[in-house]
Image: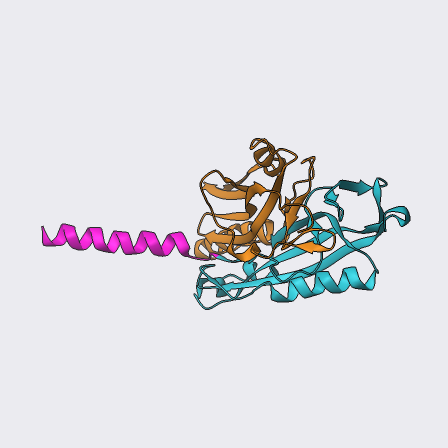
Chain colours: A orange, B cyan
Amino acid sequence: MKRRSKMLTVIITASSVLFICSCSSYPQLITSQYVDKPVIIGPYWKIGSKLDNYSSIKEQDGVKVFETEVERVLTVTTQQQGNYQTTNTYSSGIHSDNISRDILMQNPTDEELILIKQCYIGAYLMYAPGGAIQKTFGGVEGMIITKPSKGK
Amino acid sequence: MKHSIKFIIITGILSFSFSITGCAGARGKIKLEELNHPVSMSPYLYDKNGKTLSINNGLDYSRGLFIRKKYFGTFYTTVRLTGDGDLSRQIDDAITAADSDGIVNFHYVVDQGGTNGCVPLTWLPVWPGTSDVVFMGDIVKLSKGRR
């Protein structure tokens, strides 16, 4: 009888952690909506014109480079204290507005072009005895270069 | 001495196993190098003369961009299985279909995929983890006076 109730407790504990983590949606937004200049992704830097050397633009002296990542983390832990089970949920993260802030911190001028070279995304759920971690994250890598001359 | 080394090695292996146990998910990179239209992650875009435009200030809103994409990964998220080639094409197709010139306010939302919660299958390194990503933005075209 005792073994059965122990088994039941373990199953309920494991199921509750799994339920909380797999059913809860905890999405992360990636945006740079607060930047007051165009933040270009891809080779076309303006309507009707592209950067010929887009894929070969690399970090050089004097080029401002930025890299920023934002994330949301949900941690669930369970503890068994006698007949009582406690489930604790913590959430933490880096707000998506940080992307705009990090770009603006570079002080881009009107003669410069903000270029996103690469965005990245990721999400994982780590489940282990006693708890689970759910993380969604994303970010951008880019640089601020001098605007191409007129007509290009 | 031999026993303590053995103990440390076993503890190390067990710790590593526990740290990755049940970890399922996916990572992805978005480069969009094959795009044929300008896309901006802010509300602004340059016109042909390099002047900054925004919606109702040189640009007209056509319609919204909404693309769902699933990224796959395996071996506890370390191996990426999804590229972004088709995403460039989808964005270009959406702009062309709207007879427009570009996109402003491009942003995306990352979330867990359904396969990440399938314990105990996620303990297997070959189990495919997923990330659901929704790409959004405002498809815009130049105002009539600026064409």
Judge by depth and name the residue closer to the eye, A12 or B95: B95
- Residue displayed at 72% across by 52% down: B136
- Looking at the picture, how far across and down is residue B97, in whole percent? 82, 64
Tell me which segment is drawn in magenta. Answer: B1-23
Q: Is residue B145 left or right of residue A28?
A: right
Image spot of residue B62 (x, y percent): 85, 53
**Up-down relation of residue B122 to residue B61 (above or below):** below
Q: Nearer the viewer, residue B131 or A5?
A: B131
Q: Is A104 positioned to the left or the right of B80 in the image?
A: right
Q: Is residue B22 magenta?
A: yes
Name the chief secondary structure element in magenta. Answer: helix
Question: Toward which corner of the image does residue B85 lie, by quadrant?
Answer: bottom right
Q: Residue at x 78, y 55 (%)?
A: B101
Q: Closer to the camera, A110 or A18?
A: A110
Residue A46 seen by the camera: yes
Q: Residue at x 84, y 43 (%)?
A: B58
Where residue B108 appears, x then y in whole percent?
66, 50
- Residue B137 among those drawn in magenta: no
Q: Quick one: which residue is furthest to the left in this view?
A: B1
Residue located at (20% from left, 52% from top): B7
Q: Is residue A5 visible?
A: no
Q: Is residue B44 above or below residue B136?
A: above
The extreme bottom residue here reads: B126
The location of residue A91, given as percent across then percent down, is 56, 38
